[in-house]
Every structure is written in C-alpha cells, then in structure tokens.
Amino acid sequence: VQTCALPIYRKKILETELINEQKLLQDAKRELEEQENTRLGSERRNAQRMLDRVEPYQKKVKMHEDNIANLQKELSNLR
C-alpha cells in the first residue's frame, strides 16, 4: 500500500464507523424514548426511581453523540 493511499483508506474506515455510530445513536434514542414512556408501579410514587432507571439509556445516547462528534472532527481533519 502506498503512503498516499493511506488517507483514503482511513477516510473510508472513519466514514463507515460514522454510519455505524449514527445507526447506534438512533437505536439508543429509541430505547431511551421507550424507557421514558414506561412507568413502573413504584415509579409513580417515586420519580427518582424512574430517573435512576433511565440514566444508563441517557448515558448511552450521550456516548454515541460524542463518538459521532469525534468521528466528524477526524474526518474534517483529513479533508
């Protein structure tokens, strides 16, 4: 592999990762919405329980958003 071809391969890999992360973000947002719309019996009396249950889903959405931002930054540095 020639040195000049490496950025092309890197760009393709980053673009593929970006597409995958965008799909994972959509899935994570859908899961979060489902969890936010679900109220368990004990959560009707204690809102903090619902917030505690939903927190991992929020963190997952944030992680994918951060990954997408980082990939977009890397891609913009290649151009």
Image: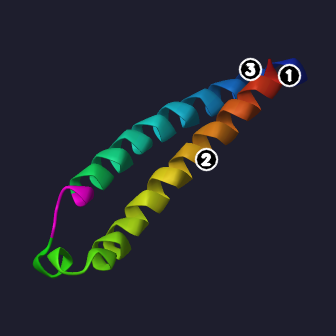
Q: Quadrant of the N terminus?
A: top right
Residue 18 is situated, as x and y percent measured from the top left of the image, at: 56, 33
Residue corresponding to mark 1 = 2
Whether residue 6 is visible to the viewer of this picture, yes or no, is: no
Q: Residues within 10 Å of mark 3 (few under 14, many from 20)?
A: few
Secondary structure mainly formed by the magenta segment: loop
Q: Which stretch did the figure color magenta?
A: 35-39
Name the colouring of the figure.
rainbow
Q: Amino acid at mark 2?
A: Asp
Q: Amino acid at mark 1?
A: Gln
Q: SS class of the residue under badge 1?
A: loop
Say which mark, if any, is on residue 8. 3
Position of residue 37 in the picture relative to residue 17 (left or right): left
Residue 42 is situated, as x and y percent measured from the top left of the image, at: 16, 82
Mark 3–mark 2 distance (CA, rounded to whole Å):
24 Å
Q: Quadrant of the C terminus?
A: top right
